[in-house]
Structures are given as structure tokens and as C-alpha cells.
Image: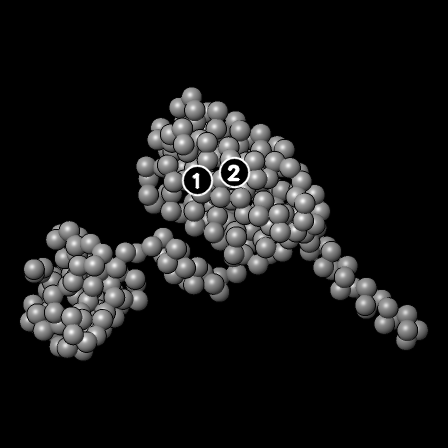
Amino acid sequence: MTVAVPSAHPAGRPRRKRTDEIVDALKRMIVEHGLGPGDRLPQERELMAQFAASKGTVREALKALEVQGLISVRTGPGGGAFIERMGEGRAMSLLSNFLFAKNLTIANIYEMRKALEPLVAASATAHIDAAGLARLEAIIAIYDHEPADAQERWNQRMAELDFHGVVAEYSDNPILAFTCRFLQRLLKDLTVAQDIYVQPEPVQRQSGIQHQRDLIAAMRRRNAAAAQAILAEHMAEAEQHMLGLQAKLHDRFLADTEEPIRTRRRRTA
């Protein structure tokens, strides 16, 4: 089981670290040889010979693949480097860590959702089946009524995002589907969005629910253009709704902050 490591460096392309070249070569090896979860890569000595690399360089390359979640390295008898299944959750966690200090906003996320969610709905229309449509209708039933308590309120807000995650499952574009689900996860994890979701004030959902029911109808008719248009309108409305709730939350925070200041001023007057 061998794969070549490029040694030439075309003009204008900076020389890459040897470790990075080996990482890329191992990735190609995994794909070209059809290796799957549980399969083992060649032993360390074989990799050293194949890539004419030191033990430290090979181990660094294997560690990089392990950090990326593509392999696991086991020690002891029967040990070695084994292919791992890269779960979507792990991939999203890695991306979330990258964006952790980027000061993401609700507006940032909805700018992307407005562009991509209509496309994912259109691409899913040709592929969604009766079971998928039934799942969407069942999810709407979670939030088509006022919540009985705070826990149900939270569950309803999460279900609103899950609706769009199910739509994305049926897209034939894996990059588009993953990106849309990632944006939905960011909203679930974003602190300011969580602060909005736990607010006890009633949520006006009827327009959004009607958009979703219209989407289901369009998908049932296999009308991708209609599905795209409906989601475009739905996302624009959802953005305005969330930004409005964010503004209310901000005003409430300022009022709560200013009240103690006014109280202290009266006491010192």
C-alpha cells in the first residue's frame, strides 16, 4: 500500500512542510485504497521507509491526522494507526472552535442563512420522500401552540431549527447541507441567541409556520423554484424577527443597568 509524495515545487508555490506533504499523501492513500473505519494504515516503520522520513516526522503527520479526527493511534500489541469515522458533530465542533473568538452575531449567521437555506430547500425538493415530509409536519406540531413552561419553550425554539436541519438532510449537495446545518448549530450555541430563546414573551410563529407548511406543499409538488422562493421569504422574516428580539433584549439590559445608577444618584442627592 503505497502512495507517492510530490517532491517538485512548481514555480511560485512556497515549499511546504514535509509533515504536511505526508499528511496529504496519507489522505490520498485512504481514498485511493478505499480504506474505511477500523482499517489500519501501514506500520510506522513502513511509512518511514515509504516517505523517506524520520520517525518524528511520521509521528507528527499521524498526530495531525488524529487531531483532525481521521485516525486514532493505539499503542501496545495490535496497535497502530486506524481509520476513524469523522462524525458531523466533531467537524462542527472543530469549526466552532475556529470561530470562537470571531465575535459572531445573529446578523452574520442570518446573512449566510438567507443566501444558503433557499438553495438547500430547492436541492432537497427532488429527493425528499413521504417519510421526510411527515417528519417535517411532526416537527411543526412541537411548536404550533403556546408552551406550557420554560422547558417546552426552549424545546420549541430548538425544534424550529431542527425543521431546517431535516430539510438539509435531503439535499444532494453535501457541502451546502453541512453548511446549513452548521449555521443552525451556531444559532443553538450562540450566547445572545440562547438569551433570546429563553425570554418568556410570546413568540409570533404563525407566519413562519405558514411558510413552513407552504414549503412542505411545494416539496410535495416537486416544485423546487417555489420551495426556494418560500424559504427566501421565510429567512428574511426570521432574520427581522430575531434582530427585533435582540434589540428588545438589549434595551431591557440597558434599562436594568441604568436603574441602579438612578437609585444611587437619588440616595446621594
Tell me where residue 130 sits by quadrant: top left
Q: Tag 2: Cα neighbours inside 10 Å, few (<14), some, or many (≥20)?
A: some
Cα–Cα gap, marks 1 and 2: 9 Å
Residue closest to the eye, 128 or 251: 128
99 left or right, relative to 201: left
Q: Residue at x 52, y 51 (%)?
A: 187
Q: Nearer the viewer, residue 246 or 147?
A: 147
**Residue farthest to the top, as pictured:** 221
* Apparent side of residue 83 relative to residue 68 in the rendered image (left or right): left
Query: 3 above or below 108?
Result: below
Q: Residue at x 81, y 68 (%)?
A: 260
At 43% from the left edge and 37% from the top edge, which residue is drawn? 167
Q: Would residue 13 appear left or right of 181 to someone viewing this image? A: left
Instruction: Compare marks 1 and 2 and give the one earlier in the sequence.
Output: 2
Q: Residue at x 63, y 47 (%)?
A: 153
Going by the numbered disc 1, the residue's amino acid type is: Val
